[in-house]
Amino acid sequence: MEAQAAHRDNFITRYIFSQDHKMISRQFLITGIVMGCFGVLLSVLFRIELAWPEQSNAFLHFFLGDRWAPDGVMDPNIYLALVTIHGTIMVFFVLTAGLSGTFSNLLIPYQIGARDMASGFMNMISYQLFFLSSLIMIISLFVETGPAAAGWTIYPPLSALPQAILGSGAGMTLWIASMALFVASQLIGGLNYVVTIINLRTKGMSMMRLPLTIWAFLVTAILGICSFPVLLAAVLLLFFDRAFGTSFYLSDIYIGGEVLNHSGGSPILFEHLFWFLGHPEVYIVILPALGITSEIISTNARKPIFGYRAMILSILAIGSLSFIVWGHHMFVSGMNPFLGSVFTFTTLLIAIPSAVKAFNYITTLWKGNLRLSPAMLFSIGLVSTFIAGGLTGIILGDDALDINVHDTYFVIAHFHIVMGLSAIFGMFAGIYHWFPKLFGRMMHKGAGYAHFWITFVCAYGVFYPMHFLGLAGLPRRYYSNEAFPMFHDLASINHLITIFAIVGASAQLIFLGNFAYSVFFGARATQNPWRANTIEWTTPVAHIHGNWPGAIPEVHRWAYDYSKPGYDEDFVPQTVPLRKGESDGH
Amino acid sequence: MTGVLVAAVLVLAVVAIGQLSNLLRLRGEIRGGEHPPAIPTERDNNRQGTLMLLFGIGLLIAVIWSLFAWRDTLLPEPAAAHGRKVDTLMRVTLALIFIVFFITQPLLFYFTFKYRGVKGRRALYYPHNDRLELVWTSIPATVLAGIIVYGLLVWKGIMYPSDKGNDDPLVIEVYGQQFNWTFRYAGRDSQLGDADVRFVGGENIVGIDPNDSRGRDDILTKTLHIPKGRKILFQFRSQDVIHSAYMPHFRVQMNCVPGMVTQFSFTPAYTTAEFRQLKHVQHKVSSVNDAIAKRRARGEDVEPWDFDYVLLCNKICGSGHYNMQAKIRVEEPAAFSAWLAQQKEFKDL
Ligand code: HEM
Ligand SMILES: [Cu+2]
Ligand SMILES: [Cu+2]
């Protein structure tokens, strides 16, 4: 009480320079959603182009104008730019900052029993850098030569030479600036998460009593801290090559009628540096979603998560293995084939802990008493897509098989399903489930169901058929599929995909409407609406500084005592002391 | 196809309308107000559980349907010797994937339906079972070990082919530039001349060193001709940015990286003429021509197609990336030699 009374705030300190983890969490969430809208809109634009290549379209003209869609026909340069920015926004801005930023901030202090993050100030800086970085990325859409267009992987020399592609002019410079700020934001945020989890746990909250969400956020933050600096180094060297004529990545190039003055560099070096971040990055995207899902599935199945220790071990195994598999993106890059063998070996190892997680989710459902809320449906959807997408990874991770599907639509299908859909579903699940903690109200259930079903059906409808495009040999990042006669018969599949994409994208309006409506007019939340065990549900519904009005509660057991024999209720909150002779869960 | 589309949209519409009515009913419940409105009721569990089951069934049916309906779009059998091994590995892996998919997905959706919440029932408290965990750690581990070893053997066979010794390969340089391909043959002396980016210009697209006598008889072409049955060693280079030489019918791909030479070797197994006779290829050609006929009927200017092997660029390289192609012709060795003898040598350009 005292803490709260002492703290006065006005509009600015409350909404803009807030150091409160709950407000920062909401800031990350809203920024992430706005960026998500951009990402989805861009994908609809280029999906239209792919279904009706090089045809005039009023919708395209409306968004791209005369500059990029003269007479409504999309320009090939902007096609590549749209794909690039779509990928960048989705991976980094929505599913890294939007997802981790929202839920790490919201749940770490709440679930470990801390009054706030270790450093509220750093937390604030982390958000502000992210905001600035988002702003720059969006501004880059409007520069004269267009935004970065070398793919989200920005391989040089394409990304280094403005002569090579329009987007490698000012657009690329802004991309680098934006990502440099982004990395700084991630590092500051990540350090804060790790320190908070290690140091600020409440009495009784041993590591082996942490909810799986927190384990996932911890490993995610460590992955980020170890890998994002490498991306920063990679793009800084790229910047030097672009601006100061160094030759880290460039050598033996003839372009625009002249031999360039660069020699001795290697693009392969960039590929190694990029994927040293790039691969852990996909786990940075997926682990928080898996953590969220573990929590939601257990709570709504009214059943302990099956194999808590195995779940932790597999998170740790996935996290550490993720640092030694990056080369599976480079099987046909020209690197030594022996390295191909090594990376195939390590890559396929990751399938083991991933399989364990999938089996454990399914077993958690077995003999449960499932409350099928929208959050629960999205979580089950995640398990489905995580399995479906993970399985095709066995093909891509196998160097001999990757030769013929590398960089085709098979890859697009694989990573959208296993990482894109799974992580987005995890994010939706988290929003529906923790909305009461975010905004003190409930989201509308019926609209949530409608949103889930249309999204789920369209998600498979968009990405499942892409496997066939890839197996037909269709490369990704192609502005038109009609330059090669052998792809003409794919037109009907491309139509199907685009229609699902448009319907699926429109369905997100249901979500946006529900979100906006519920923030202001949703049914008021009760303190523990889902009857969950974790201690964020012991805080008052209205946000207060310091989270708990009195002392921070002490924790006596793990988070998963659902339907424990001997108790009348089907949940036993972590704050309930163990009875005499009762053993702690796992 | 259009039928499927309409059906899909209809299904979605039905789901949406169903949910909307749900929504309206809910408003009533909010007013009635006994059950907290955002918490699923038993009826919600029933309805959503059933929908999940239906979705699971629909998903499996759609997957099986697609395997038949879209078969012709897939690449035909490989036109290179090593490709057979790749395709066999692919089939084994796909079989495995489908087995796991068809076990886990039905379980997931069935459990969701079967254990949908009912008032008064209590879930089973079942936090762990180490024996079970061990089983489903060791089964995937064993199967994956098999796949890994199998895959590595295939990879080794493709990437270290020269272990066999005395096969004298035909060396061809594949040179990428924005946005086309050039091929260089060694000429009479069977040796490629040195090349360097400083010599690029005019007719000398690939930068052959004019002072190197080995390069004077080199031959530059824009279509790739290769003899059947002889091993070809491709050396890849690039003039400007990274490209990737992708020859899907041969199961071949390798990046072309400025500043270095990469390589890949394989032996073509069918001439172009022979490949056109394969049943799968003919199916593919006729379904492509069906699609083309439809567009011609709409007044578009598209030529009917006869099958040819192609080389595609498969690494983003700029605005013309989607159209960076070259034709590949596989011929009997005699026809190939005759063709090569007719080409101009570098010194005559
Ligand atoms: C609205 C739903 C989405 C649709 C319809 C969609 C569609 C596509 C398509 C067709 C491509 C390939 C374009 C090409 O290679 O020419 C693509 C690229 C990509 N998408 Fe999405 N996508 C969606 C959502 C997502 C999500 C949720 C993610 C998050 C992981 C994501 C990440 C990416 C990335 C990283 C690329 C690669 C960009 C590049 O090639 O540089 N997308 N998307
Ligand atoms: Cu990877
Ligand atoms: Cu290209």
Image: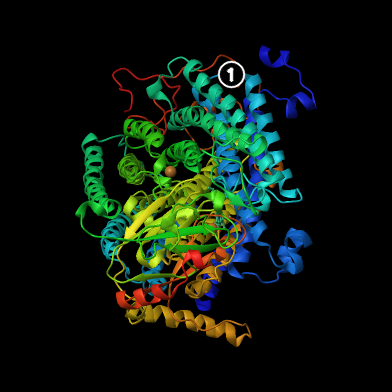
Circle 1 chain:
A
Front in this rendered view, residue B138 or A489: A489
Front in this rendered view, residue A399 or A33: A399
Identify the residue at the far bottom of this view.
B297
Residue at image coords 35%, 72%: B76
Can residue B299 be seen here? The reply is: yes
Is B212 located above or below residue A501 in the figure? above
Q: Would residue B126 be found to the left or right of residue A170 on screen? A: left
Residue at image coords 36%, 35%: A321
Is A83 located above or below residue B218 in the figure? above
Disc 1 marks which amino acid? Arg
Residue at image coords 49%, 71%: A487
Q: Would residue A433 be found to the left or right of residue A313 on screen? A: right
Front in this rendered view, residue A417 or B279: B279
Q: Position of residue A209 (x, y in %)?
A: 40, 24
Picture mark count: 1
**SS at mark 1 in the image:** loop
Q: Position of residue B17 (x, y in %)?
A: 59, 65
Is B136 located above or below residue B171 in the figure? above
* Circle 1 residue: A115
Q: Quadrant of the C terminus of chain A?
A: top left
